[in-house]
Image (cartoon, rainbow, N blue to C red):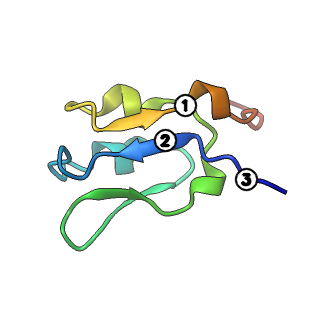
């Protein structure tokens, strides 16, 4: 079974380590690495809510609407 990953990419060159994406993610998918750059740790848990993409001040994150999975209740 193929697992779709809604987060297409996180541009580490663009990321400043503000941690907004980490704090806003409702599914605890995004973390900071040792260099204070965002990365997706649990991609299979991403529900493609687009919060990380929307709130990233530098637009470093891109989420694919084509790969979005159904949001679990009560979202």
Asked if the residues shown at circle 2 and circle 3 are in contact, with their CB atoms under 8 angstroms apart, the answer is no
Q: Residue 44: which quarter of the image?
A: bottom right
Is 14 rendered above or below residue 63?
below
> Residue furthest toward the front?
2
- Marking on residue 4: none
Residue picked out by circle 2? 8
Give the quarter of the image for residue 43.
bottom right
| Spot occupied by residue 57 in the image (x, y as percentages of width and height) | 21, 30
Which disc number belongs to residue 64? 1
Q: Secondary structure at mark 1?
A: loop
Give the quarter of the figure containing the N terminus: bottom right
- How far is disc 2 from disc 1 in space, using C-alphas? 6 Å
Q: Nearer the viewer, residue 39 or 9?
A: 9
Q: CA distance from mark 2 to mark 3?
A: 13 Å
Question: Residue at the location (68% across, 46% down)?
Answer: 4
Mark 2 or 1 closer to N-term? Answer: 2
Q: Which residue is mark 3?
A: 3
Q: Residues within 10 Å of mark 1 (few under 14, many from 20)?
A: some
Cα distance between the residues tagged 3 and 1: 14 Å
Res. 37 image quadrant: bottom left
> Quick one: label 2 or label 3, which is nearer the N terminus?
3
Instruction: Say which residue appears at 58% left-offset and 40% top-offset.
Output: 6
Q: Residue at x 45, y 32 (%)?
A: 51
């Amino acid at each position: 079974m193929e697992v779709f990953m809604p987060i297409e990419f996180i541009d580490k060159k663009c990321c400043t380590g503000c941690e907004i994406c980490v704090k806003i993610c409702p599914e605890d998918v995004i973390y900071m690495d040792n260099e204070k750059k965002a990365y997706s740790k649990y991609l299979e848990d991403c529900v493609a809510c687009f919060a990380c993409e929307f709130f990233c001040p530098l637009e470093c994150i891109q989420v694919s609407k084509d790969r979005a999975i159904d949001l679990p209740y009560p979202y």
